[in-house]
Amino acid sequence: MTDHYYTSETENVGQFRCETTFIPSNVTFATDLPASFEGRAEFPSPGVLLGSTLASCMMSLVSVVAARKGVDLKGMRVLARAAESSKGIEKIELKVIMPLEGSHPLRAMLEKTALSCPVRQALRPDLETPIEWEWK
């Protein structure tokens, strides 16, 4: 494969830090290992980014489904926490804060949609991803 097929490039810049560039826009961000793994913990760890990626994927998918039904989810937030140990990432906990009333007719559909997010489906089957929902 040639390089034009890739969307990102990650470089080890030393001291357990990596810098990743999103090639299409040339945006760069850094990651550090957690302090418990001898990292500096000055930037998000790969585990934190995995949790953020899961949150972003779920939110994007839920937002598209809601928009198709004429519902704007502006203000929706998702908090994510990756529980890491020496064995790796053991759990990604999510809290979804919805700008809609708990009695909203789309509630069940939106909660089900979040579970079908492609990133969640790509995770290993034994990785727990509990979701707490907070409705207005």
Image: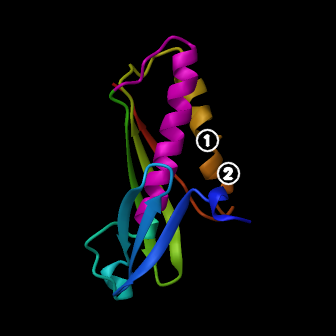
Residue 5 position in % (x across, y down):
67, 57
Labelled disc at residue 115:
1
Residue type for callout 2: Gln
Q: Which residue is mark 2?
A: 121
Mark 1 neighbour density, 10 Å: few (under 14) some (14–19) many (20 or more): some
Residue 17 position in % (x across, y down):
37, 79
Q: Along the horizontal axis of the image, is 65 left or right of 135?
A: right
SS for dot 1: helix
Q: Is residue 5 magenta?
A: no
Q: Residue at x 61, y 51 (%)?
A: 120
Q: Residue at x 57, y 38 (%)?
A: 114
Residue sitting at the far left? 42
Q: Is residue 36 above or below residue 65?
A: below
SS for dot 2: helix
Q: Earlier in the sequence, mark 2 or mark 1?
A: 1
**Residue range of the region highlighted in magenta in the rendering:** 48-74
Residue 30 seen in the figure: yes
Q: Residue at x 60, y 63 (%)?
A: 127
Residue sitting at the far right? 1
Residue 108 seen in the figure: no
Nearest to the observer: residue 91 or residue 13: 13
- In terms of image quadrants, where is residue 46? bottom left
Residue 131 position in % (x across, y down):
49, 46
Q: Along the horizontal axis of the image, is 2 left or right of 120?
A: right
Residue 95 position in % (x across, y down):
40, 45
Q: Is residue 43 above or below residue 37?
A: above
